Amino acid sequence: MEVNPVSTEMELDNKPTCETVPGLPQKKHYRQRAHSNPHSDHDIEYPLTPDHMDWSKQYGEFATGRRVEFADIGCGYGGLLMRLSPKFPDTLMIGMEIRVKVSDYVNEKIQALRKHHAEVGHYRNIAVLRSNAMKYMPNYFHKSQLSKMFFLFPDPHFKNKKHKWRIITPTLVSEYAYVLREGGLIYTITDVKDLHEWMVKHLSEHPLFERLTDDEMNADPVVEMLYDNSFQHWAKMGGGGEDEYESLPTHSIPVHLAAGALAGAVEHCVMFPFDSVKTRMQSLCPCPETKCPTPVHSLMSIVKREGWLRPLRGVNAVAAGSMPAHALYFTVYEKMKSFLTGNTAGHEHTLAYGASGVVATLIHDAIMNPAEVVKQRMQMAYSPYGSSLECARCVYNREGIAAFYRSYTTQLAMNVPFQAIHFMGYEFWQQVLNPEHKYDPKSHLIAGGLAGGLAAAVTTPMDCVKTVLNTQQAAEADPSNRRIFLQARYRYRGISDAVRTIYSQRGISGFSCGLQARVIFQVPATALSWSVYELFKFMLSFEGGHSS
């Protein structure tokens, strides 16, 4: 096709920037997950038939007397559309993209370009639709309407069970043959050899398609533009400039480990004074804090009687245990979630989130339980230990290694439902507040706090039992001499002993001791934990993307 002067003028604006085109959107505000489940029930509006489709909403008056001829399926951030527009100025082209933020970005970019070139009418021939081409292709296009279809770097869906999600399948190829006119072309390109062979196989086996010869491809001016666009894709994957957000880098195990360790340290240390209050209120050892009306009053009582640093006793033990525990905890959760959901998100995966949390808890508690024992014995009123190391040494000498895991089954009985509720709640609120699952500090903070608070309130009774087993303190104490009578042999052998003792001494209300303090501790702690985890996962993953 001969290129007229208008087309040449348009080529000069091939790579517009915010400096050359006012109002051009920035990709950093439109970050989006790289993958989307095409079989999910997306909230998409689509026409009943092609005759019901009003293309004037996309092209305005320029659509009069014209039909869409080019379709870029999974158009991403619209790079190909911007390149094709000046080459075929009278041809209507549509990009179809399932991801909300990505389609919003392309639409905003097209509108900005049209406004900037309003006097000469450039970019009127391209538009974008948020839609699912795997489901609704025949709803948009008549039979034999399209002359070109583009499939650039589609999702490879490596797992065998996910191959049905691929954009090129025998059923879909038949649909493409229906909307393509005789002599129409399908263009494909990918950097995955297996996917390339898959697409060539299914297209070649279809009776209505045949592969072009090398001479035919060399003579097609569009082919060269596809390879230009592939170089742009490689730049996006490698982390060069603004285009790096086309495909967010996959989070590796070192990223999860590092982000999880930092999140664990923040979660357990920032609100540690209220954890000390909760331990004292749940312990069977008499202390003044049990009579305070609120956890804040209890904290002030400890500070007034024992000094500012007293609520922080044992924080070094929990910091040492929480970093490796949470590193594995978040890593196992992310990998299990990815395995069970296939890297997709939605309310339909709620049970998968819970199951992933349960598996992560088994690993977390095995590492964290000894630190919990030392921490809670250091937190007790009239605790005789001078340091966490001294406490660990005394417990080991008097009660053996079993003392550090005596409450492990109780810890699991508490933390399995806690983490199941916690993760299901977090993912639920993320889906509500942040359906695109992009990095959003506000949604991470709110979702983490709500999920942690609910889980803490529900599992408080088992936390009371765990505290009694960890501290192993009888109800006898000598406040006047600031002494506590430690038993040479442990008194509470298991959950039944602790439950029976709590009920006999405090009644049913004994299982709700420390509820307020536990919720006050968990809401900001889990909110901060998720915020720090998502922040460092975001930062470290992009650093890894740049270094690759």
Image (spheres, rainbow, N blue to C red):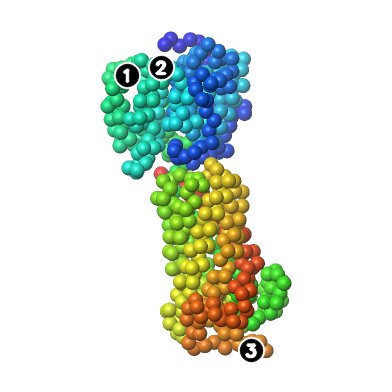
Query: Which comes before the other along the chain, label 3 or label 1?
Result: 1
| Secondary structure of the residue carrying numbered label 1 | helix
Q: For marks 1 and 2, give the CA distance.
A: 25 Å
Residue denoted by label 3: 478
Marks 3 and 2, how far apart at CA: 92 Å
Please say if 30 is above or below 296: above
Q: Position of residue 546 (x, y in %)?
A: 45, 43
Quarter of the image with the N terminus in it? top left
Type of the residue with mark 2? Ser
Quarter placement of the C terminus = top left
Q: What's the distance in space between the residues labelled 3 and 1, CA to CA?
A: 93 Å
In the image, 410 versus 393, the foreground residue is: 410
Q: Nearer the viewer, mark 3 or mark 2?
A: 2
Give the residue type at disc 3. Answer: Asp
Q: Residue at x 35, y 15 (%)?
A: 183
Q: Is the residue 126 above or below the residue 316 in the image?
A: above
Residue 13 in view here: no
Q: Which residue is mark 1?
A: 218
- Which residue is depicted at the point 44% across and 68% down? 366
Q: Which residue is mark 2?
A: 144
Mark nearer the viewer, 1 or 2 = 2
Instruction: Using a 10 Å C-alpha cutoff, classify the residue at mark 1 as few (fewer than 14 neighbours), some (14 to 19) or many (20 or more).
Output: few
Q: Is residue 126 above or below residue 382?
A: above
**377 to 333, vertically: above or below:** below
Which residue is drawn at the image coordinates 45% and 44% (left, top)?
Answer: 344
* Residue 286 in picture, x, y percent from top left: 64, 82
Q: Earlier in the sequence, mark 3 or mark 2?
A: 2
Which image quarter: residue 24? top right
Q: Residue drawn at (45%, 83%), measured in percent from left and top?
A: 399
